[in-house]
Each structure stands twice: as C-alpha cells, then as structure tokens.
Amino acid sequence: MQPTQTAAVRDYKQLSQVERAFRSFKTVDLMVRPIHHRLEDRVRSHIFLCMLAYCVQWHMMEAWRPLIYADEKQQEKAFRDPVAPAKRSVSAMQKVHTKNLEDGSRVHSFRSLLGHLGAIVRATCRCPGADDNAPTFTVITKANSKQQKAFDLLQSINA
C-alpha cells in the first residue's frame, strides 16, 4: 500500500474516535441529552461544555491506562498495517482475562475507578451531644494505594 493510501486509511479509522465521542455524549458517560435550550448562545454554551467534559474524560482515560481495561501499547498503532484487524497487546489481553493488574490489584473500568475514588470523602463533624453552635472539625478519608496511584497519574496530564 502506498504511503498516501496508508495515511488515508488511518485518517478514516480515526473517524471512529469521533463517533465514539458523540456516542459518549448521548449515553450514560456524560449524560448531556436532552438539550432543552432554544436560544443560540445557550445551545453553543451547552455544546462547548459537552466538548470540554469529553476532553477532560479523554485525558483522564489516557492517564489512567495502566489502571483500566485499556491497551497501554499505543505507540504500536502508528506502525501496524491500517487495513489489518486491530489486535490488542499481550498485556491488555492479560488484564482482560485475569481482571488483575501486574501487582495483583483489580483492574477497573473508567466508571468503576471513578466510583472507587468517590469513596474518599470530606466530612464535617461535631462531638456527639454538642449543641448546634459547638465547633466542628473536618475529617478527610485517607486515599488507599490504588486511589493515590490514580491521583498521581492525573498529575502527569500536561495542561
């Protein structure tokens, strides 16, 4: 296959990423439907916020590739035959079959990892039996090793 044909096939296949993004908008991932706006400025603002939300989600998923059911070997995509069926790497297939990471911890989906991070809470507490004007204090749940790893990976996102 000639280089221009190869580039054309790769560009065409990238359309699936755009389609996946719009499908993400319309389903439970970003929950942006239905649009009840009628004024042009509000519709544009709504679409802008949807695109921004998807951009944030995409960057988070890229950063969390080591923790979720995603193939980490993305560099190989540029060199494989664009017409041949895509094949997942051995490490990605191992994650799927064992449902565990190399350290033995559980592999997450994007949504389950968000849920796992949602277990970290900040609670405002007051001593039992104290009146409503008594001083309060704040307790924040300490992140476990998986949660801390997820936060550390988010730090790698270049703004």
Image (tube, rainbow, N blue to C red):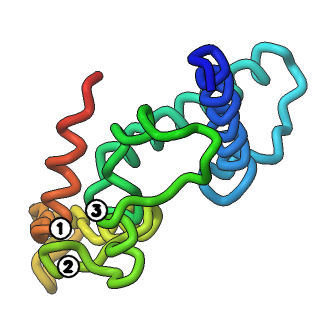
Mark 1 lies on residue: 146
Q: Quadrant of residue 127?
A: bottom left
Is residue 99 rendered to the left or right of residue 127? right
Q: Is residue 136 visible?
A: no
Which residue: 60% across, 55% down?
A: 29
Quadrant for the N terminus in the image: top right
Bin the neighbour count of mark 1 within 10 Å (Cα to Cα): few under 14, some 14-19, many 20 and up: some
N-terminal-most mark, 1 or 2? 2
Which residue: 39% across, 38% down?
A: 59
N-terminal-most mark, 2 or 3? 3
Mark 1–mark 2 Cα distance, whole angstroms, equals 8 Å
Q: Nearer the viewer, mark 3 or mark 1?
A: 3
The residue tagged with tag 3: helix, strand or loop? loop
* Amino acid beneath label 1: Lys
Q: Is residue 108 visible?
A: yes
Looking at this view, is 123 or 38 the one in front?
A: 38
The residue tagged with tag 2: helix, strand or loop? loop
Bin the neighbour count of mark 3 within 10 Å (Cα to Cα): few under 14, some 14-19, many 20 and up: many
Is residue 90 rendered to the left or right of residue 79? left
Mark 2 lies on residue: 105
Looking at this view, is 113 or 89 the one in front?
A: 89
Q: Quadrant of residue 43?
A: top right
Residue 154 image position (x, y, % from top left): 24, 43
The reply to whether discs 1 and 2 touch (Cβ–Cβ < 8 Å) is yes
Q: Find residue 67 and name its label.
A: 3
Mark 2–mark 3 Cα distance, whole angstroms, equals 9 Å
Mark 3–mark 1 Cα distance, whole angstroms, equals 8 Å
Look at the picture and state if 119 lies above or below 33: below
* Amino acid beneath label 3: Leu
